[in-house]
Image (tube, grey):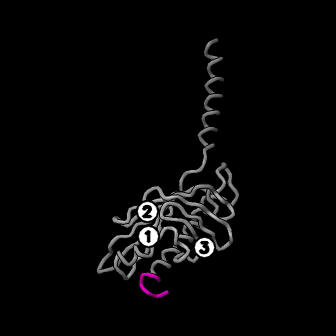
């Protein structure tokens, strides 16, 4: 008698466990972009180290204001994103920052944290790496295409690539 009651309970528990294992939220996605620049690290940092001045070197940003602690960016589509620095180290030529409040009209991301690093490269060049962990705009289990993982990665990657090309152009004296 005890065994006949135990089997249905084990079966129900197994089904519930299987369902909950499949129902999980988003996982962080990685974006990692790098550029090699024919300029000294100091010349590159003079451009890239201006956290609030990102509009001067990233073509995806129409305007920016703030300080090396916090900035508000206006993207080409007119939407704004506010970001705050967690660590700014001019001596090591790096900073890490995060988005404060999501604006899905600006970027299809619910949150992200990013790091920009300037390091000496090979044969007198400089390498700039810009990488992030980003969460999709819709954190539900079945997000629409415009708010899924790929949309978030693509949008942030586009922003980073444009910024890196702008840093390169300015540091190499081509803009």
| Quarter of the view holding residue 43 | bottom left
**Picture coordinates of residue 19 (x, y %)?**
64, 38
**Picture coordinates of residue 119 (x, y %)?**
35, 70
Mark 3 nearby-residue class (10 Å; few <14, some 14–19, many ≥20) = some
Q: Which mark is residue 49?
A: 1
N-terminal label among 2 and 3? 3
| Quarter of the view holding residue 46 | bottom left
Q: Quadrant of the N terminus?
A: top right
Q: Residue at x 65, y 17 (%)?
A: 5
Residue 174: in magenta span: yes
Q: CA distance from mark 2 to mark 3?
A: 20 Å
Q: Residue at x 61, y 47 (%)?
A: 25
Q: Residue furthest top?
A: 1
**Picture coordinates of residue 14 (x, y %)?**
61, 31
Residue designated by label 2: 95
Q: Nearer the viewer, residue 65 or 38?
A: 65
Q: Nearer the viewer, residue 66 or 141?
A: 66
N-terminal label among 2 and 1? 1
Q: Are marks 2 and 1 in contact (CB under 8 Å)?
A: yes
Q: Are marks 3 and 1 in contact (CB under 8 Å)?
A: no
Q: Which mark is residue 63?
A: 3
N-terminal label among 3 and 1? 1
Q: Is residue 39 left or right of residue 24?
A: left
Residue 58: in magenta span: no
Q: Is residue 174 above or below residue 160?
A: below
Q: Is residue 102 above or below residue 49?
A: above
Q: Is residue 162 left or right of residue 16?
A: left
Q: Residue at x 66, y 23 (%)?
A: 8
Q: Nearer the viewer, residue 29 or 56?
A: 56
Magenta residue span: 170-175
């Amino acid at each position: 008698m005890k065994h006949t009651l135990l089997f249905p309970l084990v079966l129900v528990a197994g089904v519930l466990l299987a369902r909950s294992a499949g129902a999980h939220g988003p996982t962080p996605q990685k974006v990692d972009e790098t550029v090699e620049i024919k300029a000294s690290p100091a010349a590159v940092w003079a451009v890239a180290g201006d956290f609030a001045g990102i509009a001067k070197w990233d073509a995806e940003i129409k305007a920016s204001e703030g300080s090396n602690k916090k900035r508000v960016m206006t993207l080409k589509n007119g939407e704004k994103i506010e970001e705050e620095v967690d660590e700014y180290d001019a001596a090591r030529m790096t900073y890490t920052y995060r988005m404060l409040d999501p604006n899905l009209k600006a970027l299809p991301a619910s949150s992200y944290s990013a790091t920009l690093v300037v390091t000496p490269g090979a044969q007198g060049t400089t390498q700039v790496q810009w990488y992030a962990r980003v969460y999709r705009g819709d954190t539900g289990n079945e997000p629409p295409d415009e708010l899924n993982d790929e949309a978030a990665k693509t949008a942030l990657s586009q922003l980073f690539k444009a910024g890196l090309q702008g840093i390169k152009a300015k540091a190499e004296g081509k803009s």
